[in-house]
Amino acid sequence: MATPEECHANTRLREQKEGGSRGRWKVRCQRMTFETLLDRYQTEILRYLVRMMGNRTDADDLFQEAFLRAFRAFDRLRANSNHRAWLYRIATNTCLNHRRTNRRRGEVEMLDESDQRLHAGHRVRATSVSVLEVRRALQRLSPRQRAAFVQRNLQGLSYTHIATALGCTRATARANVYQAAQRLKRELGVRSG
Amino acid sequence: MSTCSKFDHMLERLIAGDADRALQRGLERHAKRCEACGPKWRQALNIRSALQNELDETTILIGDDSVLNARGRLRVAFSRAHRPPVRFSSMRTPLGLVFVGLSDRGVCDVTLGARREAEYRAHLARRAPEIRRDDAELRPVMVELEAYFAGERQSFSVPTDLRAVTPFMARVLRAARNVRFGRVASYGTLAAKLGMPGASRAVGGALSRNPVPVIIPCHRIVQGTGDLGGYIGGERMKRVLLQLEGHRRVERSALAASLAQRVNG
């Protein structure tokens, strides 16, 4: 049975830039197995899905679905394309499809776990806006805006990569991020005291 | 630097995370001088800080253990999604046309009552990514089945592949395999043997979904009263199989007597 762990036939050669940002483009052979890809990006993709869905249960389900899809499509992935953006694209599409098919639920169960564990030995920035409010506001954005904003702000992707992940141009990606920022500013901004 | 008219847009840049140091300093300088823009600026900074807090919190909440969990479930999903290809063959028997499917580990499917190959292919397509007719590969299995239906063989030596069923079903099926040729057992006794007295219905349910009937002889399990009970291919097939195994009269009293004999013996 071909599990990704065993699937060494599924290797990719990848071009890598050597000698830092000023170095020449040299082709260096690197075995990129699906396993390596999974190891490298599983954590950030899971966090991305939690932020997109607003709860862990859905995120866990979509994590499976996204990586199953990725595994099936891995053979068709070109060696010189950006693996990270490609994974984000699959994860984002999985989220969007899920939202389309699961309209039934109204208010999503929020990622609202006790903060005690977090605040022990961990410095939290003083602010009048709580994390929960941020999460709620993120959930109220349109899925594409949320995807763009989360990728930019919380996942640290470049606009080029966001454009790849959303399947749009850089300008559209940027517009999505700004619309989200505008809406967050409006919703979290006006308050008294 | 920044004027009030541009200020709102610049704050959006700040929230989006696109403000470099120079822009941030410019905004700060303007906000400290301008009464209208000051509160807006402080609120934008609050949103930024809250976003940073979210970043930290999620990083801690979705830590290594969450990832390990998700990864474990992913492994299970992979083994389900990547089922091995199945080769199959068919033969005529007293039960009609019988199709047999073979995976990389053994017989994974026996289908009674499919009338055409296309029908069987459609049935297999749901559980195997690749299906191929391969009479030569299936030859050893078919030889054993032929001998069984000719009354020359009482048990099967070919391995079975029960990966597609649940662990509980696999346990029930393995127990059913121990009921020997010519004997019968009741659903209740089988349940008791598995350490679950009273679970005869669950046992019946598991047997009714036996992927490899005949090879795993679920037809040897009947009701405790001596009634025949159900069968995958219908009651008639169960009767034919039991007759083949030497039960001359397959009816209530005779089967009840066989069950009693088993208990006493």
Image (cartoon, helix red, strand yellow):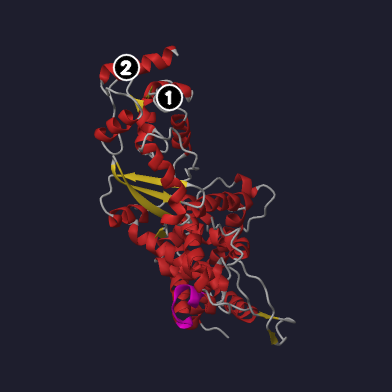
Q: Earlier in the sequence, mark 2 or mark 1?
A: 1
Q: Quadrant of residue A32?
A: bottom right
Q: Nearer the viewer, mark 2 or mark 1?
A: 2
* Element under disc 2: helix
Q: Position of residue A141 (x, y in %)?
A: 41, 65
Q: Nearer the viewer, residue A128 or A21?
A: A21
Circle 1 crowding by C-alpha within 10 Å: few under 14, some 14–19, many from 20: many
Which span is picked out in magenta? A162-171
Q: Nearer the viewer, residue B225 or B248?
A: B248
Q: CA distance from mark 2 to mark 1?
A: 15 Å
Residue sitting at 39 percent across and 34 percent down?
Answer: B206
Q: In the visual, does A138 lie left or right of B31?
A: left
Q: Position of residue A72 (x, y in %)?
A: 48, 65
Q: Amino acid at mark 1?
A: Leu
Q: In the visual, does B108 lie left or right of B31?
A: left
State which chain disc 2 sits on.
B
Q: Is residue A143 visible?
A: yes
* Element under disc 1: helix
Q: Quadrant of residue A38?
A: bottom right
| Residue located beneath label 1 in the image | B190
Q: Position of residue B89 (x, y in %)?
A: 38, 53
Check residue A166 for magenta coloring.
yes
Check residue A154 for magenta coloring.
no
Q: Is residue B211 visible?
A: no
| Residue located beneath label 2 in the image | B256
Q: Nearer the viewer, residue B209 or B69?
A: B209
Residue sitting at 48 percent across and 33 percent down?
Answer: B174
State which chain disc 1 sits on.
B
